[in-house]
Amino acid sequence: MSPELRIEGHVATLTLCRPDVANRLAPEDLPAIRQHIAVVNHAPDVLVLRIQSTGKHFCSGYDISEIGGSQAEGAGFGDMVDALEHCRAVTVAVIQGGVYGGATDMALACDFRLGSTATQMFMPAARLGLHFYLSGMERYVSRLGLDMAKRLFLGAETLDASAMHRAGFLTHLVEPDALQPQADELCMRLAGMAPLALLGMKAQLNRIARGTVDPAAVREAVLGTLASDDLREGARAWKEKRAPRFTGR
């Protein structure tokens, strides 16, 4: 079953729906996920994209029997993950079990990665004889550091949840029964932030991590928030000790 997208208010949820094969991704899933991301990008009210899956595992990566077509120019697995990293909304991966192969890069492309103590990861590229694509290796290095990237890509180590958290792969680590409530709370908290500041800083932080930030663009964004209705509303709400009512203007 293809990945599904549901939008409720400020939060969109993309669900992987092949639990019988550990939510392995098939060739037709790549354009489907990119289309879902495009829908989110064109939905101004959506501030958060939550990525989750059904069953025991988050995702076992790309179907190895179809690996030859995974690097099609402009339409490959890496292009789908790049689209996820560049999603306008803040992205939250909810990882309840195993995350393997290319799915580890899919998770790393997200802004937040919540895992349970049952989570583990494994990158088998070297064991399979596959050279990983550039943007994926860049994500590993920029988020986890060069030494950890080498341990995972070259040494093909399996990390348990605790090691994933220490390495920075997981931004949050909780017990299994707390994973969904923690994800719900985080998504709702993010959805309550001021849109101009939330989405602007998300984009610029990723550019800083990649070394592609434009200082002039950051200054323009800062000045834009200084002149915004939302900043004035945030100040009033803070003074009145109430939740702000942001409009994104």
Image (cartoon, helix red, strand yellow):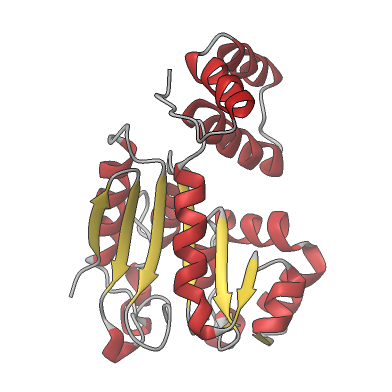
Identify the residue shown where x is 26% and y is 81%: 18
Which residue of the protein is positioned furthest toward the left in this rendering? 1
Which residue of the protein is positioned furthest toward the front in this rendering? 240
Q: Nearer the viewer, residue 108 or 234?
A: 234
Work out whether residue 118 can be spotted.
yes
Q: Quadrant of the C terminus?
A: top left
Work out whether residue 131 can be spotted.
no
Whole-percent x, y for residue 61 in the image: 42, 77
Whole-percent x, y for residue 107 in the image: 51, 65
Identify the residue shown where x is 66% and y is 23%: 214
Which residue of the protein is positioned furthest toward the right in this rendering? 147
Identify the residue shown where x is 82% and y is 69%: 147
Q: Nearer the viewer, residue 117 or 146?
A: 117
Side of 183 relative to 14 (left or right): right
Identify the residue shown where x is 65% and y is 83%: 161
Q: Residue 223: which quarter of the image?
A: top right
24 shown above or below 78? below
90 shown above or below 195? below
Q: How many marks?
A: 0
Side of 26 relative to 49 (left or right): left
Side of 86 relative to 225 (left or right): left
Q: Residue 154: which quarter of the image?
A: bottom right
83 shown above or below 52? above
Whole-percent x, y for residue 195 in the image: 47, 31
Which residue of the protein is positioned furthest toward the top in this rendering? 227
Q: Nearer the viewer, residue 22 or 11?
A: 11
Whole-percent x, y for residue 221 in the image: 59, 18
Q: Quadrant of the N terminus?
A: bottom left
